[in-house]
Amino acid sequence: MIVITRVASGSVNRPYLTEPMKQTTQRTHLDELENQSIFIFREAYHAFKNIAMPWSMGKDSNVLIWLARKAFFGRVPFPVLHIDTTYEFPEMLEFREWAKKHHNLNLIVKINIEARERGIGYETHDPVTVTHELKTVALQQVLAEYKWDALITGIRRDEDPTRAKERYFSPRNAQFEWDYKDQPPEFWGQFATSSAKGEHVRVQPLLDWTEVDVWRYIQRENIPIPQMYFSRNGKRFRSLGCSPITHPIKSNASNIDEIIAELEATKVGERAGRAQDHYERNAMQKLRAKGFL
Amino acid sequence: MQKANVQRSTSNAQRPTQTDQRDVGIPLRIVFVGHVDHGKSTLIGRILHDTDSLPEGKIEMVKKACAAEGMEFEFAFVLDALLEEQKQNVTIDTTEIRFKTKRRKYIIIDAPGHKEFLKNMITGASRADAAVLVIAANEGVREQSRRHAYLLSLLGIKQLIVVVNKMDLADFSEEKFQEIEKEYRKFLAELGLEARVFVPASAKNGDNVASTSSPSDESVRMADKKMKWHRGPSVLEALDLLEPQSADVDLPLRFCVQDVYRFDERRIIAGRIETGKLRVGDELVFSPANKASKVQSIEEWGGNGDGEAVAGDSIGITLTEQIFVERGYVASHQTDTPIEANRVHADVFWIVREPMRSGRLYDLRLATQEVKCEIVSIDQVMDSSSLESTTEKREQLERNEVGRLTIQTRSPLVIDNHDRIPKLGRFVIVDDDQICGGGTIFGGVYTDRIVAKSKNIFWVEGKITAEARAARTGHRGAVVWFTGLSGAGKSTIAQALERELFARGMQTYVLDGDNIRHGLNSNLGFSPEDRVENIRRVSEVAKLMADSGVVAITAFISPYRMDRRRAREIVLEGNAEFVEVFVDAPLAVCEARDPKNLYKKARAGEIREFTGIDAPYEPPEDAEINVHTDRQTVNESVATILEGLLPRLKPEQADA
């Protein structure tokens, strides 16, 4: 059974299109965001020799793939990285394999095998420890292996307070630390485009997008996303992570219009269903200071 | 007040689900500035309240907290509480708050922080379309009222609203308001700024903040009574009068090339249209090369575009003629081209601890261009906090200073004056890969190429190395060895290439029959032995030139593989690049061209041992670059050579 379906307005499932739909109306906020993101993609591709793009298969991640293909005329000209925690939803893995072919991706899958062999897992450890080991450490390992000098990430300012003050190009030192108190100035479309040995730069093309912008864009462009975002039996996932610690929210939103309407009414944060953020006070900030995306 | 709140939230719940035009439209980004304690936070808090943008229960929560502390409730606390939630342990230096009016969405860019104010203000405010400057009526124009306006002028933010706040503390006096307006307008005019409108208000009471047309808001009716004399708009109405800075589309075309992609058979020139429009079929001029070609297509993944792209679009185009284009080039229409200059006047602000020094080389980045530059002179310096200026002779620009500088660039820069086309009239200065400052270009442009006074920047002790030469010239020495039949186009292309390299500020020279045969090799004929010796001498001369840092271009038939191999060996003994270029055209084509009637003479037997007729030509098997002059124009051939050659001429990176 194929689980990936594109849900267009009015909840009608449509067959996949191989190419985006062309909009002819006058410039909108989405046009502005899209063009800015493409500009950032191309600046990054020029500035760095060795780029990779982490891909979680979540909605923002898939928007990134889409924007990359727009920036590079149908191609994603760098590897796409999935950090597989081994706690992935089977539906997501199925989507991964489908999307890999569909977008013709050079996919690298990384598992922190060493940590799993040590017995790190949600069954026995707290979520902050497991997330750190299976995501951040896994990322450090794969970064050391491939020596990427830039990572393109899908984080947005509106997602989380610690992400609000990010830059489009955000340097990380070899320990992955983010010096938020002394960030480089960024203006007039000029970015911090260098990284010393062992350092890398996080490139963040979706920084100015909001959760609703992402949904409107997925709708406008008809971007394939996993079906788990849509309501089944009165529940849907608003944000997707490891299966043991990601919980669906109560929702009857079964198409994008309904999701947008729901988001505009809600006062609950996007990542409320992500247990590792709430395990302890400021958990997200601690994770991010240690290099979590 | 509470009543009004309840009513609004009910009407919110009944909002129809169809798309609200305000959500799709482009939001206006505004920055709030003004002297400390003149009421910026209160005004923002008030605006958020009056536009129903606060989370449910927020006001009640803050009111309760105030009551518990025995403090009077203030709207500034609402903003503080909102930021507090956002910041947790992190000190936020720029963040965004959103609200909506009847007309559109707004994003407030908050740029607080007294430490490193200039750096943070620039990062935040440079993205703003407009600014709201707050002046307290009871205190009037103060130091920061002036300083912030100055920074706005520096950043080129021209849309400005001045809110004269705390009118309740000035008895809602029209006279006081006019006094402030008069004084401040005069100051703004000195900076070349003009406020759209001055609005008297009291953010604390909500007087004249929200729209006067919302009759449910009691405080607004009160304001009408208190400031009947005010005929202008309220603060929100004034905001709704502003426009996003998108007049960019009406300016002349400036398409800045980010990259040239060859993912498939297409050669796509990718970049962003900073200003103006571009259509399929348009004749474009690329600066600084000054080469023209037509837009063949606007490439778009999955697009069946309408053949037009406008300011703000990140696009890709293909050209009808494959001229050489690379990152940094700026395309325009022939009727309105930008300026090319090596020397510019600019107001430069400096934001890092290490000062900007005369005689030191910096990188200057303007749109996608990057060139080396240095200060020629510092003509005036202003302290961005005290606004005190000095014209005394200075050798450096310190942090938080703004200097009026003359800057010399190593290679030509494509620019516009900032007041005409802001996006091509501003740049950043980069040192050691760090953005250290920025500047705006003004006042016409010097096009003379008088080189700045030598400053011994590259003084080297002892033997001068190839690296030192490359550091000075910006490129490595090389021999570009053309080979091909007589009439294939070697000399024509060699000279066109020389002009291209020269225009880039590179050191280059063509060696050909004209300047070699008559002097150095005047004792040689055309026998096989003499031909070998001819090429050997040319190789040695080219090697010496390349070792001295020059890009030597040789244009000789050089028919024998062995001779060319030896030329390569000779050159590689030194520290220079050797690049073989096969200028390829079928014999029939060359013979048909026969520019010097040599083929005719050879066929007639008047010339003996003529290559291609009665002497062999051994085509290269692995030339670095091949051009086909039977199907490529001269420009296209030169473009092909530049693409292959320029990367090889880059000085070696110290860290590589």
Image: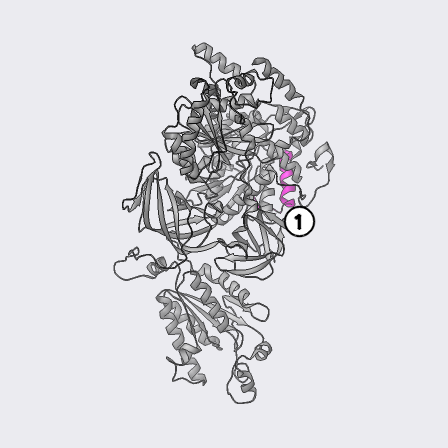
- What span is colored magenta in the figure? A90-107
Residue B179 point in image, percent of width and height: 42, 26
Q: Toward which corner of the image does residue A197 lie, by quadrant?
A: top left
Residue B98 image offset from top left, x and y in percent: 54, 28
Q: Is residue A55 covered in magenta?
A: no
Q: Which residue is mark 1?
A: B306
Secondary structure predominantly adopted by residues drawn in magenta: helix
Which amino acid, mark 1? Asp
Quadrant of the rendered image containing residue A251: top right
| Residue B307 sits above or below residue B354 on the image | below
Figure quadrant of the N terminus of chain A: top right
Instruction: Kindly indicate the quadrant of the structure image that contains residue B5.
Output: top right
Residue furthest out toward the left = B462
Neighbourhood count class around disc 1 (C-alpha, 10 Å): few under 14, some 14–19, many 20 upward: few
User: In screen coordinates, is A72 left or right of A192?
Assistant: right
Nearer the observer, B319 or A63: B319
Foreground pick, A9 / B492: B492
- Identify the chain of the residue marked 1, using the numbered disc in the image: B
Residue B336 x, y percent position in the rendering: 53, 54
Q: Secondary structure at mark 1?
A: loop
Q: Nearer the viewer, residue B270 or B650?
A: B270
x then y, percent, for residue A178? 43, 35
Q: Nearer the viewer, residue B158 or A133?
A: B158
